[in-house]
Image (cartoon, helix red, strand yellow):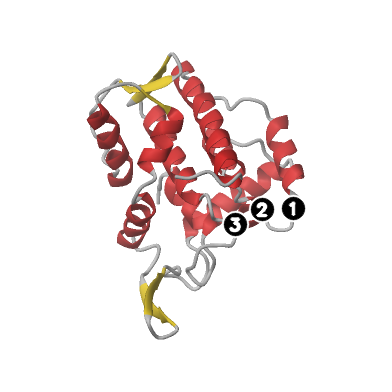
Amino acid sequence: MDINLAEELLLLAYQDDGSPAPDSSWLDYGLAGAVLVELAVAGRVAPVQGRLRVVDPTPTGDQVVDRGLAQIVSARTEVSAQDLVARLREGLRDAVLDQLVGRGLLRRTEERVLWIFPTSRYPSTSADQAVPELDARRRLGLALDGTAPPDPRTHALWSLVCGTGLIASAFPGHPPEEVKRRLAAFGEPRWGDRAVREALAELEIALAATTTVMMMGGSD
């Protein structure tokens, strides 16, 4: 089953009991970044002087990705990647979770905290982790141990993991600096389209700036 980068990132960021992992504080920003990656790869957005603009408003057929596309179209102007990450993250996690439930990969369970406050968990529908999550972990693991270099999508997923502080969830047992060094050693991802490479460069800068502000106590 093919799933988008936002779905892969979310699966990596949720624990087996269906709750967010402790290091998922900036997950929403990573999900927004993942949607922008998908839009760039699909040729829907392109960078123009440090901003992103829609070059093709045709829906991709993926509801989560098209939700982001519609939000950018509604802006009616070029917007910086950092502004888009902040804008697209609103409500995005619920949209990704709903899509994964709709795909039959996760199920929604309702519980109450202290018998009062309702909360939802999203465990896998299988006895083990969802197959796409296992595949993502396999690809990341092969790249980390040097067995195989990451393909462009795996490279992008790895960058999103590092950019949003999800290293403990995606690479359990590996020191963060080691994971970041290994990623840097691969250089730029081998995207064939220059516009995609430029969009990803803008996005990495945006995620770094956004998460830095949040870690220093900045407001939304």
The residue at which mark 1 appears reads as: 174
The residue at the point 66 percent across, 49 percent down is 141
User: Dot 3: few (<14), some (14–19), or many (≥20) neighbours within 10 Å?
Assistant: some
The location of residue 4, given as percent across then percent down, is: 41, 44
- Which residue type does callout 3 highlight? Asp
Dot 1 amino acid type: His
Q: Nearer the viewer, residue 104 or 38?
A: 38
From what the image shows, is residue 62 above or below residue 42?
below
- In the picture of the structure, the residue carrying the numbered disc 3 is 23
Q: Quadrant of the C terminus?
A: top left
Q: Is residue 68 left or right of residue 2?
A: left
85 to the left or right of 154 = left
Q: Which residue is mark 2?
A: 171
Looking at the picture, does residue 153 appear above or below residue 172? Answer: above
Q: Could you give the CA–CA distance between mark 3 and mark 2, rounded to whole angstroms? A: 12 Å
Q: Residue at x 24, y 27 (%)?
A: 57
Query: Is label 1 in contact with label 2 (beta carbons under 8 Å)?
Result: yes
